[in-house]
Amino acid sequence: MTATETARRVLEGSSRAVVLTGAGVSAESGIPTFRGDDGLWRDYRPEELATPAAFARDPRLVWEWYSWRRQTVSDCDPNPAHLAIARWMLHRPEVLLVTQNVDDLHLRALRAVSGESDRETDREILRLHGSLFRVRCTGCAHGAPHREPVEVRDESSLPRCPRCEELLRPDVVWFGESLDRDLLERALTGAREADVCLVVGTSAVVQPAASVATVAKQAGASLIEVNPEETPVSDLADVSLRSAAGEALPTVLGPSDG
Ligand code: NAD
Ligand code: ZN
């Protein structure tokens, strides 16, 4: 049996799967991962901009970068990998989707396959690293969805909190910040209860997100990895598919031919 057939069989037989995705699942949509030169914006590395210190020093610059990232994502569409995961979830209410991505492509794929247009699908996605399309107040921590263009002319034009007037920041987890405890706990509970863990397009070096895969494996789940490159979880994987997500997942998760 090929690795693809094995993966297919394991996933077909699962009754509680957890899916963990990273930047690689969106790469074929045209959204750069942070590794590699196309992840750079001007001459900045993400580590220089996605930090609380960078925002404190120059919030206008950080907002300019996030505006560019929002625009990049808005110009892209879900790819066959997002769509395959979404279709699979539609038929399997027990599947838990956990993502490190801050784009909205999983959500747009879910809407596309379920025929819903502008209203949120009720299927929850655990976004461990937050969302490009939400903001949070630097003063009172009030959070809200936010899609409107940000005027990055100067600091006075940046968005402010409707409650306390402090600066709003992107509601994403920056380098050096902790993940939301409740979200992480729900992801790890899902991992402990899973019989299969499908890990797609993550370098699996960003902790604690990567622990979703190791916790699932330690609790007895089969681990299936889809990534053109080896990662720290490759050694633990029961099946490794060394292909692009958009090529592998429609076959692995799609309806059977017969
Ligand atoms: P990452 O650590 O998740 O690494 C990307 C992985 O994807 C690599 O292992 C690479 O081999 C793999 N990959 C590349 N193309 C692929 C494909 N077509 N199919 C399957 N796998 C593929 O991501 P990162 O870029 O190092 O970013 C770290 C963090 O930065 C993320 O956890 C996320 O929070 C954030 N980020 C998010 C986005 C997004 O939302 N789309 C993009 C960049 C970075
Ligand atoms: Zn506030």
Image (spheres, rainbow, N blue to C red):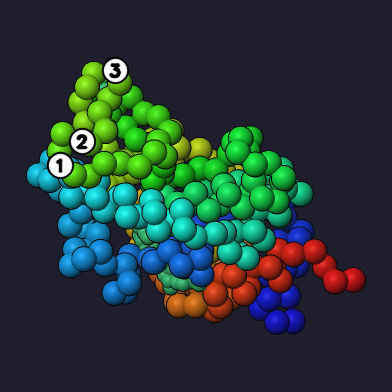
The image shows residue 150, relative to residue 203, as above or below, that is above
Q: Secondary structure at mark 3?
A: loop
- Residue 183 lies left or right of residue 69; in this view the side is right
Q: Is mark 3 within 8 Å of ligand 2?
A: yes
**Between residues 141 and 113, which one lies in front from this camera angle?**
113
In the picture as drawn, the residue positioned furthest to the top comes out as 163
Residue 251 in the image, given as x and y percentages of width and height: 71, 71
* Residue plotted at (21% across, 58% down): 47
**Image spot of residue 217 (x, y percent):** 54, 58
Of the residues under marks 1 and 3, which one precedes in the sequence?
1
The amino acid pointed to by label 2 is Ser
Closer to us: mark 2 or mark 3? 2
Image height check: is 108 above or below 11?
above
Q: Position of residue 191 (x, y in %)?
A: 55, 48
Q: Is residue 38 left or right of residue 12?
A: left
User: Separation of disc 1 and disc 2 at Cα?
Assistant: 6 Å
Viewport quadrant of the C terminus: bottom right
Q: Tell which of 110 and 190 is nearer to you.
A: 110
Distance from Cα at disc 2 to Cα at disc 3: 17 Å
Q: Is residue 103 left or right of residue 154?
A: right
Label drawn at residue 225: none
Query: Which amino acid type is marked by label 1?
Result: Asp
Q: Which mark is residue 163?
A: 3
